[in-house]
């Protein structure tokens, strides 16, 4: 047993003179209580001044936050939320310092309505810091480890990617007319009642736990169009992921947070009931725009939250005449902004993270009257085959605070093997955007000068770069083409063509032509140039050719940014009618026309024709829709697609 004398020696045991300051404590517990100074329960960014720290006492503020969280977690049948209390249940003495919600709020209908979960406390871990979340994850979540560079390695469980077929949107009187439904649409309907069944299931699951994580954060760096989001989840992994991906409020902003504009209930560890109407699997991601809520059951893949909120923005922003974009975005030293559209794996994150330019964001943006703004506060990079040489900024961002999903690492040294696909091909790193050294803070910029459409063409017939007319830009934007290789298994040789309207059909809520019309108007008003960049195959299709060197693609992108590519000499290609430059600085000229790179010219022609037919077939669904006044744009856009000589 330690005596106070022994304790007094802590910190100066090697001091002969005995005149160093001593620790003035009586017990080991007291010593430990000195270790951690109490700070506000939030995650401020750097220079938070504690000055205008308000009229409310800390206790009152805390009580209001807890009441709001309890209301968020309210059961709809029982009408009340759980008794919530702040802090980790494992550290009880701290939790008990905070007053919980007054009793009368929870005794509305005493006998029938009360469930056991209403009789216990749910501990709320509110806006924990990365360090606290690391501790929670490592202590309580299997599969959580520190890597050699300080990142938090996690497993997302059975689902290692999004489940678009399990996404449901509540169809009610309003959304029935407003949203895009039917063929090609990502919005698969559900009714209000089934949503409530799933919501109750998620909330009951969360309330049954000892503790839940709550993140209150923002979306959109445009201060006039900022959205307040609350994420309630059961895993430190989810809380840290959203901490990184959403915009982190300052202490002061958190004080006045108030009621969120949108709430996610992530009960991903718990399945949905397959006998609930509209459910087709044990996974369900449900969006209710009227209630401003999203429920996640049966998948722990964190990307589902980020992209779910992106869908919400694709609904809210166009209502304010703001275009939401599935694109990366960066800005040159002279203020020239570029957008990078493209489906998953085409290079938005890789190419927007450019050491010579300021990063505005890697995935989700808004284009308003005043310019562009990032929706998010972080990046979500693929890390399969990541190398320090090819992507140094992303490599260096994988450090303390970063969530590393589904990667494989050495058991002892904890060095990550980025080439290992044992868990999944879709390994990911989620980090705060400030981890990229040349970030543009705040993440906003002026109107774009270049609009780059990325396609990873595994057929190997699209040119590495083409300059597009405005109608061609619209045609390719609405088509949203990419073709990745089907898989990495032996014998899979045939690339799989994907068409995803607006390069993000999985996330749009309105008809694609609505976004296309807005893009066309904005590009015209601000004189932006459209480009099509193939980041995929050259010298033949997948199996024969090879993926274009990232260094060449970067040179092409450099030439777009600098304006030098606008001045180049162009030739028009057959069928697709694309304008390809004859020279690009730093790129071998012979690869600029894909026909040159194929040894079998006949095979090239056949593959090109095959792809053109796929484009035409895909576009059939859009030919009935009208874009622009008098439908004039529709005609122009159609004419800008591939032309197949049927003779
Ligand atoms: N020529 C290229 N251009 C862009 N990316 C390339 C190229 N060659 C290989 N890649 C790889 O392809 C992947 C692109 O993925 P990413 O940038 O995350 O796409 P997105 O953000 O659009 O989903 C990265 O892993 C990158 O290293
Ligand atoms: C997170 C995603 O985005 P991306 O692959 O475009 O980076 C996703 O599509 O799940
Ligand atoms: Ca994507
Ligand atoms: Mn990305």
Image: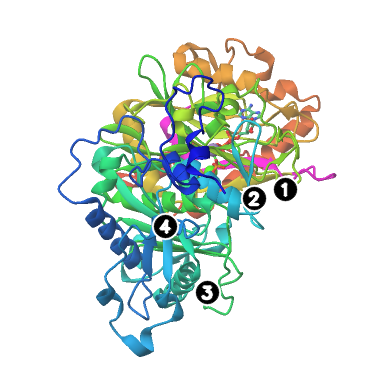
Q: Nearer the viewer, mark 2 or mark 1?
A: 2
Which sits in the foreground, 415 or 186?
415
Q: Are marks 2 and 1 in contact (CB under 8 Å)?
A: yes
Mark 2 to mark 1 CA distance (whole Å) = 9 Å
* Left or right for 235, reference 495: left
Q: Where 463 falls versus 629 (above or below)?
A: above
- Residue with the mark numbered 3: 278
Mark closest to the chain's N terminus, 2 or 1: 2
Mark 4 to mark 1 CA distance (whole Å) = 40 Å
Q: Secondary structure at mark 3?
A: loop
> Residue at 59% of width from left, 75% of height from top?
274
Which sits in the foreground, 395 or 479?
395
Q: Secondary structure at mark 1?
A: loop
Mark 3 to mark 1 CA distance (whole Å) = 30 Å
Q: Where 211 falls versus 547 (above or below)?
A: below
Q: Secondary structure at mark 4?
A: helix
Toward the left, the furthest residue is: 55
Mark 4 to mark 2 CA distance (whole Å) = 32 Å
Residue range in magenta is 468-494
**Snapshot colouring:** rainbow
- Residue with the mark numbered 4: 93
Q: Where 206 falls versus 331 (above or below)?
A: below
Q: Residues within 10 Å of mark 2 (few under 14, many from 20)?
A: many
Q: Residues within 10 Å of mark 1 (few under 14, many from 20)?
A: some
């Amino acid at each position: 047993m330690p005596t106070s004398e022994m304790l007094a020696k802590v910190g100066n045991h090697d001091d002969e003179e005995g005149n160093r300051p001593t620790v003035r404590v009586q017990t080991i517990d007291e010593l430990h209580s000195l270790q951690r100074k109490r700070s506000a329960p939030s995650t401020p960014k750097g220079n938070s001044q504690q000055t205008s720290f308000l009229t409310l006492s800390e206790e009152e503020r805390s009580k209001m936050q807890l009441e709001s969280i309890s209301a968020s977690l309210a059961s709809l049948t029982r009408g009340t939320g759980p008794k919530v209390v702040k802090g980790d249940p494992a550290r009880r003495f701290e939790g008990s310092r905070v007053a919980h919600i007054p009793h009368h709020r929870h005794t509305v209908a005493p006998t029938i309505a009360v469930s056991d979960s209403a009789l216990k406390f749910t501990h709320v871990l509110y806006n924990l810091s990365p360090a606290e979340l690391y501790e929670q994850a490592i202590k309580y979540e299997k599969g959580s480890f520190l890597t050699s560079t300080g990142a938090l390695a996690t497993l997302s469980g059975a689902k290692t990617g999004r489940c678009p077929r399990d996404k449901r949107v509540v169809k009610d009187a309003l959304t029935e007319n407003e949203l895009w439904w039917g063929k090609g649409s990502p919005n698969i309907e559900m009714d209000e009642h089934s949503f409530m069944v799933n919501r109750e299931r998620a909330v009951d699951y969360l309330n049954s736990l000892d503790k839940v994580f709550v993140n209150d954060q923002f979306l959109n760096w445009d201060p006039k169009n900022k959205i307040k989001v609350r994420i309630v989840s059961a895993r430190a992994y989810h809380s840290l992921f959203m901490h990184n991906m959403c915009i982190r409020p300052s202490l002061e902003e958190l004080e006045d947070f108030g009621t969120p504009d949108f709430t996610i209930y992530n009960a991903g560890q718990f399945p949905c009931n397959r006998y609930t109407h509209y459910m087709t699997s044990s996974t369900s991601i449900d969006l209710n725009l009227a209630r401003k809520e999203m429920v996640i059951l049966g998948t722990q893949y964190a990307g589902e939250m980020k992209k779910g909120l992106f869908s919400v923005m694709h609904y809210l922003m166009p209502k304010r005449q703001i275009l939401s974009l599935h694109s990366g975005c960066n800005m040159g030293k002279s203020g020239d902004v570029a957008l990078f559209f493209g489906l998953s794996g085409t290079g938005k994150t890789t190419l927007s993270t450019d050491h010579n330019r300021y990063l505005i964001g890697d995935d989700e943006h808004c284009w308003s009257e005043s310019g562009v703004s990032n929706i998010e506060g972080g990046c979500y990079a693929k890390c399969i085959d990541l190398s320090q040489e090819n992507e140094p900024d992303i490599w260096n961002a994988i450090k303390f605070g970063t969530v590393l999903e589904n990667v494989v690492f050495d058991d002892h040294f904890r060095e990550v093997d980025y080439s290992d696909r044992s868990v999944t091909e879709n390994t990911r790193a989620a980090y705060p955007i400030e981890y990229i050294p040349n970030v543009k803070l705040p993440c906003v910029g002026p109107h774009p000068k270049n609009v780059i459409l990325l396609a990873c063409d595994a057929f190997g017939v699209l040119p590495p770069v083409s300059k597009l007319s405005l109608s061609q830009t619209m045609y390719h934007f609405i088509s949203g083409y990419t073709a990745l290789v089907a898989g990495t298994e032996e014998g899979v040789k045939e690339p799989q063509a994907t068409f995803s309207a607006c390069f993000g059909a999985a996330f749009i809520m309105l008809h694609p032509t609505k976004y296309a019309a807005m893009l066309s108007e904005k590009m015209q008003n601000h004189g932006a140039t459209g480009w099509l960049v193939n980041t995929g195959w050259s010298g033949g299709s997948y199996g024969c050719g090879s993926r274009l060197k990232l260094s060449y693609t970067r040179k092409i992108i450099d030439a777009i940014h600098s304006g030098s590519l606008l001045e180049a000499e162009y030739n028009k290609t057959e069928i697709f009618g694309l304008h390809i430059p004859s020279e690009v600085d730093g790129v071998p000229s012979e690869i600029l026309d894909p026909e040159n790179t194929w040894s079998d010219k006949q095979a090239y022609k056949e593959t090109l024709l095959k792809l053109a037919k796929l484009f035409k077939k895909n576009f059939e669904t859009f030919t009935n829709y009208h874009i622009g006044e008098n439908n004039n744009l529709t005609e122009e856009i159609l004419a800008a697609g591939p032309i197949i000589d049927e003779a």
